[in-house]
Amino acid sequence: MHPPVAAVIDAHRSLERVVAGLNDQQVAEASALPGWSRGHVLAHLTDNARMFARLAEHALRGELVAGYDGGMDERNAIIEATAGRSAAEHRAELAAHTAGLEAVWARADEVDWSRPVTFRNADIAATVFARWREAWIHMVDLDLGVGPGDWPEDLAAHAIDFLLGRLPAGTLVRAEDMRRQWSAGEGPPGTVVDGRVRDLAAWLSGRTPVVPPVATGELPPLGPWPPHPPQRLDRV
């Protein structure tokens, strides 16, 4: 599948508009993510762009590198070390690293999208989809006026595809406004969950829907976020 590069660039521009008027006090305030300030969310979004650009840059040369040489500990340390930047510093760093990521993508041709990366043991195209999710989901976490109702419809449908594994096998998810449905895994038919596509995506991503989905019986419990498989560095 061709990655939605133009859609991610649009998400980047939306994110830049959201943080354009942010001040230092707002940066230090709590985000919608427990334990994280808005500065933590911005630090994560910024370093996520840097990491994906690093993966793509090496992949275009036929090289495989880890997203973080030090694993999740390094990722977390970077976020903690940079969360306290001023609003102006956050804006500048975010703009620089999103521009760097977009510049690497601009050099990719049709063949390049399938070049392997260590992120989820996938390819460059998968990182574009991942960045799409990261940008829109974390825009909600910034708690600056963007909610799941603002997500593009195709982003919401993609998020459901990605997060369907959080549901018990056999669960049927139906987006009333798209006339589309998804079935979680294999197994006998079970609970049916109905709602609008953006609300379903918000629920599956652990964010607050505008209108909560409804189910035949109780809403099923959500499992963990799709795990990262062990990184492999032996592919060429």
Image (cartoon, helix red, strand yellow):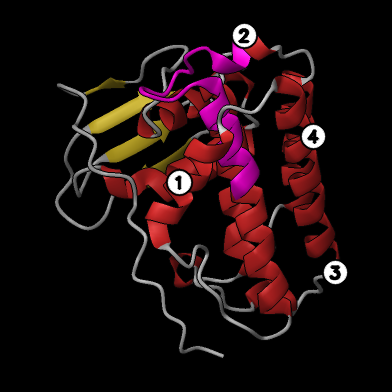
Identity of the residue drawn at 44% across and 41% down: 160
Residue to which mark 3 is pinned: 107
N-term-proximal mark, 4 vs 1: 1
* Distance between mark 3 and mark 1 Cα atoms: 30 Å
Q: Which residues are magenta?
A: 25-47
The image shows residue 108 at horizontal and vertical percentages of 80, 71
- Label 2: few (<14), some (14–19) or many (≥20) C-alpha neighbours in 10 Å: few
Is 205 situated left or right of 20 in this image?
left
Residue to which mark 1 is pinned: 77
Amino acid tagged 4: Ala
* Distance between mark 2 and mark 1 Cα atoms: 22 Å
Is residue 161 among the parts visible in the rendering?
no
The image shows residue 175 at horizontal and vertical percentages of 45, 31
* Distance between mark 2 and mark 3 Cα atoms: 38 Å
* Distance between mark 3 and mark 4 Cα atoms: 23 Å
In the rendering, which numbered label is found on residue 92?
Answer: 4
Q: Is residue 29 magenta?
A: yes
